[in-house]
Amino acid sequence: MANSPQSKKRARQNERRFAVNKARRSRIRTYLRKVEEAIASGDQAAAAAALKAAQPEIMRGVTKGVFHKNTASRKVSRLSSRVKALNA
């Protein structure tokens, strides 16, 4: 349990950051799910549009510290290769 004023303040700040990060992670997952659903439906145009909308949101998660840069790049790369494979 936090005892000093500084540690109490840090605990409050951590709670707020946790809530913000949780919301951002959830939003990113929603974008990823939309891309997955478009890929599953086989609609290449919808999948490409969903990926185009998801990519900036994923990278924003990197700048905000929710994801590691390589993790986000890997996710985008794998999704884009799957979207391209729909065309073939």
Image (spheres, rainbow, N blue to C red):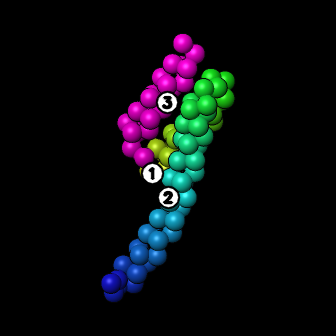
**78 within the magenta span:** yes
Q: SS of the residue at dot 1?
A: loop
**10 within the magenta span:** no
Q: How many marks?
A: 3
Instruction: Measure the C-alpha gap from mark 3 to mark 2.
Output: 23 Å
Residue at 49% x, 25% y is: 82
Up/down of 43 relative to 13, above or below: above
Please say if the residues under marks 2 and 1 sit with CB atoms less than 8 Å apart: yes
- Please name which of the two marks, 1 or 3, marks the residue nearer to the observer: 3
Residue at 60% x, 40% y is: 34
Where residue 31 appears, as percent x and y from the top left, is: 58, 43
Mark 3 surroundings: few (<14), some (14-19) or many (≥20) residues within 10 A: many
- Please name which of the two marks, 3 or 2, marks the residue nearer to the observer: 3
Residue at 47% x, 65% y is: 18
Image-quadrant location for residue 43 = top right
Up/down of 69 relative to 45, above or below: below
Q: Which quadrant holds the N terminus?
A: bottom left
**Disc marking residue 21:** 2
Q: Which residue is mark 1?
A: 66
Instruction: Measure the C-alpha gap from mark 1 to mark 3.
Output: 19 Å
**Disc marking residue 79:** 3
Q: Which residues are magenta?
A: 66-88
Q: Of residues 85 and 52, which is closer to you in this image?
A: 85
